[in-house]
Structures are given as C-alpha cells and as structure tokens.
C-alpha cells in the first residue's frame, strides 16, 4: 500500500481513482463497510482504491479542550487499512490552514486535483470543509460539475450505529468485549516496555510495564485477559493489570502485562502492544501480600481458561 504524507507527494500521473474520506479512527466495522465498498467499486472499475485521512484528528485542532483520545495510533490505522485492500492512503496534516479550507477548495485541491477521483464513497452523514458545511448533497453537486460520482452509505451497526464514540465509552467503562464487537477486533494499546518496581518478578509474576503515548485510550482499572503482541507479530497470552497497585499504597496508574508461563522474556526497550479480550475483575486492595499472590494465581488461571481452552501450547504463542 502506498502512503503519501502530503498532496505534493502524490504522483502527477496517478490517473483516475475511487476515493473514500475520513479519519477512520479505530477502523471499526462501520469504517470497514465504507472502505470495503470503495475497494469493491475500485476492483469493478479497474481503478486504485485510495483513502484520504487526517492526522491529527481534526477535533484536536478545532476543539482541543474537548477532543477525544484516539482509538488507535496512525501507524496502526494505516496497517488496518492495508488489510482491507486499499491501494494508497493520502495522510493530510490537519492544522489551522486545513481547518479554514472550504469544502469546495478541498474538492478542487485534493479530491479532483490530486487524486482525480472518478467515484467518491462516503458515509451518509459525512461532513467536511470549514465549519463542516460540506455534506453529501454539496459533494454530489460538486461531483456533477467535476465529473465524479458520489456513493453515500447508510450507517451500519447492531442496535445502534458503529462509531468511535461507542468504542471510547466502552473502553473507558472497561467493557472491552463491547469495544471489540464494534471494532471487529480487540482494543489495542501500544508502548515501550520500561522498568517498573520489579515487584511482579519477586512475587513470581513478572510483568512488562508500558510507557504509553500521551492521551492513549486506556481501559478502566482492573485485571484483563488479553494478548501481548511483539513487533515480530508473535502474540503471547497475558494477564493485563491496569491500576495503581493499591496493596502497596501506589498512586500512579500503570499498564502492565504478565505473559503466561514465561519468565525468560527480556522486553525492556521493545515496543509492544496489549490487546484486551475481557475484563476479569476490578482492581482491589488486599490485606496481605500472600492474599494478593493467591488472587494473582486465580487471575492467571482465569486468563488461561478464557484464552487457551483447547489450544495447544505452540499455538498459544502464535495466537492461532
């Protein structure tokens, strides 16, 4: 998949294309419906399927005090788009100048001028341009003048529409199962493994402590079943803890994962991801270290039962 970081990077001889536009934060099942429709139409017409997306999220520029945290990093968003069969992505930096650009100027510069769109696929509630005055009707009118067709898809979802807002609320509530149902995959946090108190290793449960990007979408405090994913793609079953270690009078919330049945891993300095499958219990304060260790044993057993029932050990390491 080709990636362009600015309009100027798009080759002049690109030719006609099928284009879809959006932030696609999380690339959830609603986004996949739109992108999938664009890819199918592109294959039908023998054209490349291209995505226009923005970084940072426009909300961070237009309303920084109330902007929501991103569901995913840009890098992971691009990885997910590649799995959908997209041929190229134009990542536009969203800044004050882009925010001030009118909808028609955006059509002229990007949709027509850079990508030579023959078909534009968007959601029915798509809005764009300065103060979001551009909508499907405006885009359709512009398309008639410029020679491109507009396909507007109705929102999809079960009970209520799939949306990044639903994902964020579910994650904040610790309801990672609902978040996964909307995303079509587990919610994911990425970070570099850093040194902590090394208390877990002394207790028999070594953990990888993640340094997260500022504003990361972190689930509610608690113990979770999930996977630790290395840069190589190796997926390891893990008990994930989010909390301040109240048994030891901790005050700083941490995100750490204990990989089941492994005490030989040296992950310090490595960028890894944690994928959340299910919340097992809230964070609790125990009266003794012995009680904590006993509960940690129960947590690991619960993770094993949740993730690995009927799976052979070699499959568990791959996440098959």
Image (spheres, helix red, strand yellow):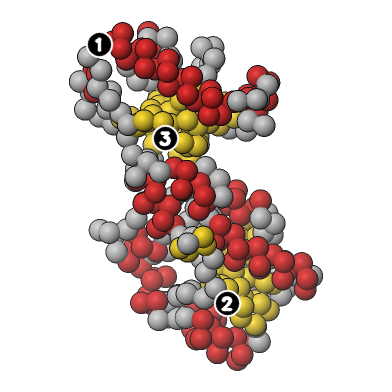
- Name the one closer to the observer, 157 or 247: 157
Labels 1 and 3 touching (C-beta < 8 A): no
Q: Quadrant of the N terminus?
A: bottom right
Q: Position of residue 293 (x, y in %)?
A: 36, 12
Nearer to us: label 3 or label 2: 3
If you read the primary sequence from the N terminus, does the residue marked by circle 1 or circle 2 appear first?
2
Residue 114, picture quadrant: bottom right
Q: Which residue is mark 3?
A: 279
| Mark-to-mark CA distance, 1 and 2 | 59 Å
Residue 309, picture quadrant: top right
If you read the primary sequence from the N terminus, does the residue marked by circle 1 or circle 3 appear first?
3
| Mark-to-mark CA distance, 3 and 2 | 37 Å
* Image point (46%, 36%), residue name: 278
Q: Which residue is mark 1?
A: 288
* Crowdedness near tag 2: few (<14), some (14–19) or many (≥20) residues, C-alpha within 10 Å: some
Q: Secondary structure at mark 1?
A: loop
Q: Secondary structure at mark 3?
A: strand
Residue 92 shows up from this direction: no
* Image point (67%, 72%), residue name: 18
| Mark-to-mark CA distance, 1 and 3 | 23 Å
Q: Position of residue 285 (x, y in %)?
A: 24, 22
Q: Which residue is mark 2?
A: 152
């Amino acid at each position: 998949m080709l990636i362009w970081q600015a309009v100027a990077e798009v080759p002049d001889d690109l030719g006609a294309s099928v284009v879809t536009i959006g932030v696609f934060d999380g690339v959830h099942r609603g986004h996949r419906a739109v992108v999938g429709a664009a890819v199918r139409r592109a294959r039908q017409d023998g054209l490349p399927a291209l995505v226009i997306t923005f970084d940072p999220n426009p909300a961070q520029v237009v309303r920084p005090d109330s902007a929501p945290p991103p569901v995913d990093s840009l890098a992971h968003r691009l990885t997910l788009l590649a799995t959908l069969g997209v041929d190229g992505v134009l990542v536009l930096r969203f800044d004050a100048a882009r925010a001030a650009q009118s909808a028609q100027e955006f059509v002229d510069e990007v949709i027509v001028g850079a990508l030579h769109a023959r078909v534009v696929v968007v959601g029915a509630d798509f809005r764009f341009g300065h103060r979001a005055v551009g909508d499907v009707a405006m885009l359709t009118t512009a398309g008639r003048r410029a020679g491109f067709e507009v396909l507007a898809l109705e929102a999809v979802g079960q009970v209520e529409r799939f949306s990044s807002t639903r994902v964020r609320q579910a994650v904040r509530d610790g309801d990672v199962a609902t978040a996964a149902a909307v995303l079509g995959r587990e919610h994911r946090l990425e970070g570099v493994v850093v040194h902590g108190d090394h208390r877990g290793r002394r207790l028999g449960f070594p953990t990888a402590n993640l340094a997260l990007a500022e504003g990361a979408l972190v689930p509610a405090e608690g113990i979770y079943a999930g996977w630790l994913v290395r840069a190589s793609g190796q997926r390891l079953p893990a008990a994930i803890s989010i909390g301040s270690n109240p048994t030891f009078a901790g005050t700083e919330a941490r995100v750490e994962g204990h990989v089941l049945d492994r005490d030989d891993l040296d992950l310090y300095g490595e960028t890894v991801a944690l994928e959340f499958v299910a919340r097992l219990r809230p964070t609790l304060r125990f009266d003794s270290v012995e009680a904590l260790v006993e509960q940690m044993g129960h947590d690991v057993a619960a993770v094993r039962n949740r993730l690995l029932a009927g799976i052979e050990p070699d499959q568990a390491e791959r996440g098959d």
